Image (cartoon, rainbow, N blue to C red):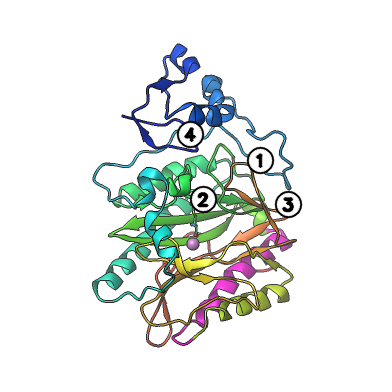
């Protein structure tokens, strides 16, 4: 049994179809079938030159909106120790529980032992994010951050939820500058003046945790008034929304709070991606839009767990997806920032399951 070498597949396969060029170089790369082989070729072929350390843009004809480019090859799929409990998408890429639940649409209420478990998972998620964020510095690649994240997860017996989720190829999302969300860790080096969002999701004890923060890279980012306005407004918008969460609050209210604050600070709100319920499923009801006058269904009730994760932009809120089918960029190439917390509704408000610790890296900087 081998794992299909297509970065878009990654399934276990009994196939004996091996890349002939690899074989000549004493590499064995197996593909499920001709479809996987042909589909991966544009990217796979560069493995053959990896010895020269060549880094390349796999989509040279794509109309990139800002300065950021993908830097391939992606590193091989990271492996999970046998003893770690896998979510349902880990093998085939499809989150079967979520897909089945989509048709029911009820909001889960957790109680008893499940509350203790999801609290624990939230805490571990925070530990993992902080452990990775410590390494954000000029020159590190997003793939090096992915390697650190993967290790921090597995050493805590956690599965990195993004890995193979709808075939996502890496263990978390790293979104730099104009990337709104779902950036794929690769050979891109962080540079002075960049911002990078680290979006961590883990699976442990049968529950998922999900949290993210945007970090400044180097002193230049912290010295740019627009960058600081964007990042600090996004950070504060989540805090404002959290302060309003309590039983009886309609979920549609959250977007009104966030957009009012965004508008006051002259930034825009992404509409394509929303917060979500989270429990034994990675993404489920309720849907939490971050824009005003939305029609979100549902009212907060003790025991519900969901995320608030606005993506705000210096220019247009409109997004475009790279040909990797994941990376979401702003349409004008201007910066976008995001912060995400995971909340449990309590009797009189909410508990932030992903709360920062006294020694968490990052945190607010003064506006200029
Ligand atoms: N972590 C993201 C969220 O906040 C989801 C990432 S899905 C992935 O909901 F497949 F891109 F990892
Ligand atoms: Co989320």
Distance from mark 4 CB to nearest ligand 1 atom below 8 Å: no
Q: Earlier in the sequence, mark 2 or mark 4?
A: 4
Q: Quadrant of residue 68?
A: top right
Q: Earlier in the sequence, mark 3 or mark 4?
A: 4
Disc 4 target residue: 75
Disc 3 target residue: 333
Q: Earlier in the sequence, mark 1 or mark 2?
A: 1
Disc 1 target residue: 69
Q: Residue drawn at (54%, 39%), measured in percent from left and top?
A: 186
Instruction: Check disc 3 and report its element: helix, strand or loop.
Output: loop
Q: Residue drawn at (52%, 35%), measured in percent from left and top?
A: 74
Residue 240 shows in the view: no
Instruction: Check disc 4 and report its element: helix, strand or loop.
Output: loop
Mark 2 vs 4: CB contact within 8 A: no
Disc 2 target residue: 173
142 and 168: which is toward the camera: 168
Mark 1 vs 3: CB contact within 8 A: no
Whole-angstrom CA distance, mark 1 to mark 3, is 11 Å
């Amino acid at each position: 049994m081998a794992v299909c070498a297509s970065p878009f597949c990654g399934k276990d396969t009994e196939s004996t179809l091996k890349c002939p060029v690899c074989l000549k170089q004493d590499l064995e790369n197996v593909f499920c079938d001709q479809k996987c082989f042909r589909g991966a070729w544009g990217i796979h072929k560069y493995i053959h030159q990896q010895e020269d350390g060549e880094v390349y843009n796999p989509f040279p004809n794509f109309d990139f909106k800002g300065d950021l480019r993908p830097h391939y090859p992606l590193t091989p799929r990271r492996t999970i120790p046998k003893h770690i409990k896998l979510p349902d998408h880990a093998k085939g890429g499809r989150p079967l529980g979520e897909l089945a639940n989509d048709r029911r649409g009820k909001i889960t209420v957790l109680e008893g032992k499940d509350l203790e478990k999801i609290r624990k998972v939230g805490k571990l998620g925070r530990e993992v994010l902080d452990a990775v964020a410590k390494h954000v510095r000029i020159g590190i690649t997003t793939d090096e951050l992915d390697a650190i994240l993967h290790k921090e997860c597995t050493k805590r017996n956690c599965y990195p939820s993004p890995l193979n989720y709808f075939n996502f190829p890496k263990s978390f999302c790293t979104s730099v500058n104009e990337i709104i969300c779902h950036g794929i860790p690769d050979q891109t080096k962080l540079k002075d003046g960049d911002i990078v969002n680290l979006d961590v999701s883990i699976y442990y004890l049968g529950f998922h945790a999900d949290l993210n923060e945007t970090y400044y890279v180097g002193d230049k980012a912290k010295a740019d008034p627009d960058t600081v306005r964007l990042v600090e407004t996004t950070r504060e918008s989540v805090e404002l929304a959290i302060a309003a969460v309590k039983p009886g609050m309609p979920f549609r209210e959250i977007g009104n709070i966030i957009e009012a604050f965004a508008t006051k600070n002259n930034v825009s709100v992404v509409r394509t991606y929303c917060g979500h319920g989270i429990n034994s499923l990675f993404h489920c009801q309720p849907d939490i839009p971050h824009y005003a006058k939305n029609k979100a269904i549902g009212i907060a009730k003790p025991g519900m767990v969901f995320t608030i994760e606005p993506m705000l932009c210096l220019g247009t809120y409109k997004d475009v997806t790279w040909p990797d089918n994941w990376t979401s960029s702003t349409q004008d190439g201007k910066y976008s920032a995001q912060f995400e917390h995971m909340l449990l509704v309590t009797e009189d408000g909410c508990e932030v399951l992903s709360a920062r610790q006294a020694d968490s890296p990052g945190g607010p900087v003064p506006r200029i």
